[in-house]
Amino acid sequence: MSGETKMVHFSIMDAYRLGIGYIRRRFQRTAINVASIALANSFLTSLAFADIFYQTYSAIEGGSLGVDAYQYWLVAVALIVSVVGITNAMLIAVYERTREIGTMKCIGALDQHIVMLFLVEAVIQGTAGGLIGYTLGVLAALASVGFTTGFDIIFKVGSLDLVVYLVGTTALSIILSVVASMYPAWRASKLPPVEALRYEL
């Protein structure tokens, strides 16, 4: 019947497929976002693991080595700067994709579909940045404390600690990436389709 409204099917997998496609087309912009997340995460991970390495060494050899508390405030600043940078990059991505968003809305995509697309991309970037940042952070911590504790200190740390921090810092990276992308995603979802199709960079 002509009066019926046709429902548009748009799943998480559709958003993932479109998100991967955009990442491939705009790889340099994505790489900047991932690098921003990875650097902030590696800073946090390196301090956390340096502290763990020192505590493990102190428990074995005695002493009171540790990381100064003020350094974690620097991590907080780095994380805030990362969020601001991602938000800015995602807003630019919205402007670059205005016509694409308009096309999607004209063929039936709803506001929540556009939001889902941007948030799925944020999760992908956050996951990649988290894993890279974790790896760099562990290596940086080992390099900074290895001469004091011995580079074999990593083998004296419980494997559960390694897994917990991997999951925790990666989850934090995903959360920060999603939070930073929420406003740009909302802006993208509110673009009028006809005006979006007229928009030219």
Image (tube, helix red, strand yellow):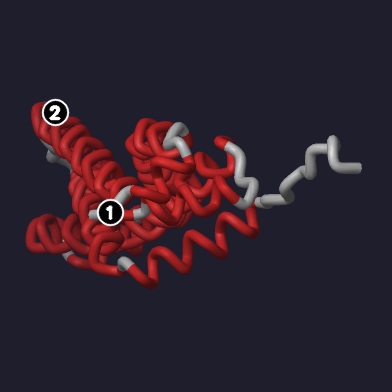
In depth, the one of 24 and 59 nearer the eye is: 24
Residue found at x 42% / y 36%: 191
Q: Is residue 10 visible?
A: yes
x%, y% of residue 5? 79, 38
Left or right? Give the position of 99 relative to 55: right
Disc 2 residue type (three-letter):
Trp
- Which-is-in-front pick, marks 1 and 2? 1
Q: Residue furthest right?
A: 1
Q: Is residue 57 visible?
A: no
Q: Residues within 10 Å of mark 1 (few under 14, many from 20)?
A: few
In depth, the one of 93 and 164 nearer the eye is: 93
x%, y% of residue 76? 19, 31
Q: Residue furthest front?
A: 2
In depth, the one of 81 and 118 nearer the eye is: 118
Residue 189 image label: none
Which residue is under mark 2?
73
Say what secondary structure mark 2 lies in: helix
Residue 200 image label: 1
Residue found at x 47% / y 48%: 102
Disc 1 residue type (three-letter):
Glu
Say what secondary structure mark 1 lies in: loop
Name which quarter of the figure residue 116 lies in.
top right
Name which quarter of the figure residue 27 lies in.
bottom left
Residue found at x 68% / y 51%: 11
**Mark 1 and mark 2: span between their CA atoms?**
43 Å
Q: Can you say which quadrant of the picture contains the C terminus?
A: bottom left
